[in-house]
Image (cartoon, coloured by chain):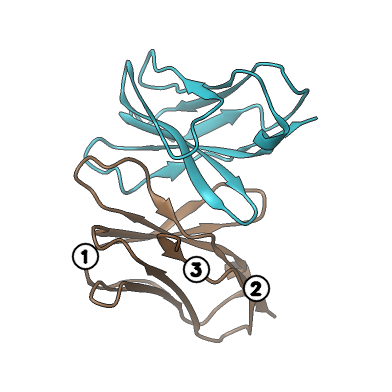
Chain colours: A brown, B cyan
């Protein structure tokens, strides 16, 4: 079992819809949870960062972490065609651990 | 503006050749990382450094090496390129106290023939 599971999609939704992207993980040591957005042929761009459980909102984006269920989500409200990209979840345990552990990414398509 | 750059952006090489990919950041970050991204595998850590003269192996380090002689640069060397090393390579950096918030470069597409 991989440490981080993420449905690769593609996930196709109409413009204006609410999008829900999710990851599950198995390592209970993870404490930091990130979402990256990656456009085609570009580097990943940090979108959201959450420490431990709870919600965090930034404009149209909301990140949720449920450590008891080992489940994290990213919600996008009022989705736009410019949101079409691959969304990568990433996790880190802290305490001097090495690099981030990534999900494989979900390819999101927002239809105009 | 501070940034992280990678060069070359595209590279074609032959099996057995030595290849060096450059990474340069102007944020003055102590932490630097190299990842490779492949279909079906996502991003995987190759090597990382927490400061000058410090280097560490990641999940997929075989066939790769790095050296850190200054804060700004972490070059990645493929000692003897193999077709299995055809991939997209990303460099990232973060502050000392924020290893979780990494900022990525634009990537280098490497094709080994």
**Residue at left offset 38%, top offset 48%:** A100
Residue A63 visible in rendering: no
**Residue at left offset 44%, top offset 21%:** B73
Task: Pick the residue in front: B48 or A82.
Answer: B48
Q: Where's residue B84, x and y in %? A: 68, 36
Of the numbered discs 3 and 1, the one sitting upstream in the chain is: 3
**Residue at left offset 37%, top offset 43%:** A99
Considering the image in quadrants, where does the C terminus of chain B appear? top right
Residues tagged by mark 3 and mark 1 found on one chain of the structure: yes
Q: Where's residue A59, x and y in %? A: 39, 72
Q: Tell me, for residue A10, which label it has, or none.
A: 2
Cα separation, mark 1 vs mark 2, equals 28 Å
Q: Chain of mark 1?
A: A
Q: Tell me, for residue B111, which label it has, or none.
A: none
Q: Chain of mark 3?
A: A
Q: Tell me, for residue A6, which label it has, or none.
A: 3
Q: Where's residue B83, x and y in %? A: 73, 33
Quarter of the view holding residue A110:
bottom right
Considering the image in quadrants, where does the N terminus of chain B appear? top left
Local crowd size for mark 3, using a 10 Å CA cut-off: few (<14), some (14–19), many (≥20): some
**Relative to B4, residue B20 above or below:** above
Dot 2: what SS? loop
**Relative to A84, residue A17 above or below:** below
Q: Nearer the viewer, mark 2 or mark 3?
A: 3
Q: How many marks?
A: 3
Q: Where's residue A18, x and y in %? A: 50, 85
Please name the residue that numbered disc 1 is placed on: A52
Is residue A29 left or right of A77 when viewed as pictured?
left
Dot 1: what SS? loop
**Relative to B35, residue A2 above or below:** below
């Amino acid at each position: 079992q991989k440490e981080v599971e993420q449905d690769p999609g593609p996930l196709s939704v109409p413009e204006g819809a609410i999008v829900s992207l999710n990851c599950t993980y198995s390592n209970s040591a993870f404490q930091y949870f990130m979402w990256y957005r990656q456009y085609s042929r570009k580097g990943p761009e940090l979108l959201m960062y959450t420490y431990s459980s709870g919600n965090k909102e930034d404009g149209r984006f909301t990140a949720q972490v449920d450590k008891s269920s080992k489940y994290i989500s990213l919600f996008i409200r009022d989705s736009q065609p410019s949101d079409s990209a691959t969304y990568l979840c990433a996790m880190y345990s802290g305490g001097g651990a090495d690099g981030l552990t990534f999900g494989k990414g979900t390819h999101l398509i927002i239809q105009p | 503006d501070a940034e992280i750059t990678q060069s070359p952006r595209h590279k074609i090489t032959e099996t057995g050749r030595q290849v060096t990919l450059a990474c340069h950041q102007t944020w003055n970050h102590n932490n630097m990382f190299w990842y490779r991204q492949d279909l079906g595998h996502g991003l995987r850590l190759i090597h990382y450094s927490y400061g000058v003269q410090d280097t560490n192996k990641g999940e997929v380090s075989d066939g790769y090496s790095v050296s850190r002689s200054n804060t700004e640069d972490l070059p990645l060397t493929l000692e003897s390129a193999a077709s299995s090393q055809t991939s997209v390579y990303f460099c990232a950096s973060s502050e000392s106290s924020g290893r979780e918030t990494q900022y990525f470069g634009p990537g280098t597409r490497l094709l080994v023939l």
